Amino acid sequence: MEIDIIGAQEELALAHLIEQLTFRRCNRLAGQMAPLEMNTLERKVIQEQYERTLLFANHAQLAKQQAQRKLFEVWASREVAPIFEALTRLDLPNTEDPIITLIGPEPVTLDRLTVADWIADELTRLKAEWESKNDPQR
């Protein structure tokens, strides 16, 4: 099981990196294209590169989503405790200090326990969903 998790994490990390690098290229090409006059040969060449890169970026996003689903399925088959341990490795506060964020016009205060509850709830739902899809009696 540990190998499955490591493989799924590596697959997601690689898919994320490819997606990010592809969108960086899109942004760079868009920046190169912006000051050029319409219908010039130079702009057309860059625009063609941009469109091909953007098409690949869409495929990279899909690959990332598939890798993310795979990792969710692997995590959903495990106990919840290791996931809470993994929270400490994320870029979240390590203390019980609240995480303040703005969603819409009102500030929302979240703490680690609230986030942990959300994760536990979502994983429970995901596990039930995954088990119902893979139930041979269905």
Image: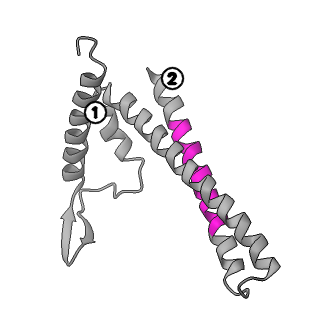
Residue designated by label 1: 81
Label 2 or label 1, whichever lies nearer to me, is 2
Q: Residue at x 20, y 78 (%)?
A: 105
Quarter of the image with the N terminus is: top left
Q: Residue at x 43, y 33 (%)?
A: 70
Residue lying at the far top of the rendered structure: 137
Q: Secondary structure at mark 1?
A: helix
Residue 41 found in image quarter: bottom right
Left or right of 118 on screen, residue 5:
right
Left or right of 79 on screen, residue 4:
right
Residue 74 found in image quarter: top left
101 or 41, which lies in front? 41
83 or 19, which lies in front? 19
Residue designated by label 2: 3
Residue lying at the far right of the rendered structure: 41
Quarter of the image with the C terminus is: top left
Q: Amino acid at mark 2?
A: Ile
Q: Secondary structure at mark 2?
A: helix
Q: Position of residue 26 (x, y in %)?
A: 64, 66
CB atoms of marks 2 and 1 within 8 Å: no
Q: Residue at x 25, y 30 (%)?
A: 129
Q: Position of residue 68 (x, y in %)?
A: 44, 41
Assess whether residue 10 is covered by the magenta stretch.
yes
Q: Residues within 10 Å of mark 2 (few under 14, many from 20)?
A: few
99 or 124, which lies in front? 124
Question: If you read the primary sequence from the N terminus, does the residue marked by circle 2 or circle 1 appear first?
Answer: 2
Prevalent SS, magenta region: helix
- Where does the magenta region start and end? 9-26
Q: Residue at x 58, y 57 (%)?
A: 20
Q: Amino acid at mark 1?
A: Ala
Question: Where 35 falls versus 118 (above or below)?
Answer: below
Left or right of 113 on screen, residue 76:
right
